[in-house]
Amino acid sequence: MKERFQQFMIGRYGLDELGRYLNIVACIVFLLGLIITPQASSLAIVLIIYNYFRIFSRNIRARSNENAAFLRIRSQFSRWLSNKKLRFSQRNTHCFYRCPSCKKTIRVPKGKGKIEITCPACRNRFVKRS
């Protein structure tokens, strides 16, 4: 039976990161649907059907482009989240300001009073209280 399934899957896309994510989201939505509303369960079924469509698809290029777009978005979100986590951990020792001209975030130490900050990216100078 395993060999027959392997023969069936030759030339098909299979499971990837987006597929795993869709499975997790579908399970969460299904469980929330059991608690909150039955309409959420139908959304979970649609997600599972879409995931099986992706798994059994023979259009490998389109599915890999979808997965690459998902990985780009996940990477951007992961970087944003780690940046917020780092800023939160440094909130007691540093102040964070945005440069008025280039909008780059600049970290300066707290407790220095009124200081002139020079942006390292555009060399713009502005005065802030730290």
Image (cartoon, helix red, strand yellow):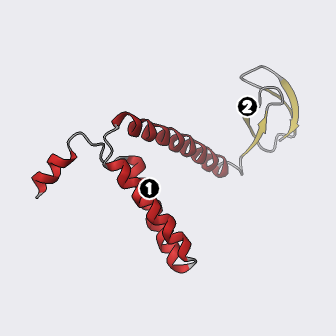
Q: Position of residue 52 (x, y in %)?
A: 35, 54
| Residue positioned 51% across, 64% down in the render | 43
Q: Position of residue 79 (x, y in %)?
A: 56, 41
| Residue positioned 20% across, 42% down in the render | 10
Q: Position of residue 112 (x, y in %)?
A: 82, 40
Residue 7 in the figure: left or right of residue 127 = left
Q: Amino acid at mark 2?
A: Lys
Q: Position of residue 113 (x, y in %)?
A: 87, 40
Q: Which residue is mark 2?
A: 104
Of residues 34 and 73, the one drawn nearer to the viewer in this rendering: 34
Q: Amino acid at mark 1?
A: Leu
Closer to the eye: label 1 or 2: 1
Residue 83 falls in image quadrant: top right
Q: Is residue 39 above or below residue 91?
A: below
10 Å crowding of disc 2: few (<14), some (14-19), many (20+): some
Q: Is residue 50 above or below residue 68?
A: below
Q: CA distance from mark 1 to mark 2?
A: 35 Å
| Residue positioned 72% across, 23% down in the render | 120
Q: Residue furthest top?
A: 123
The quadrant of the rendering that contains the N terminus is: bottom left
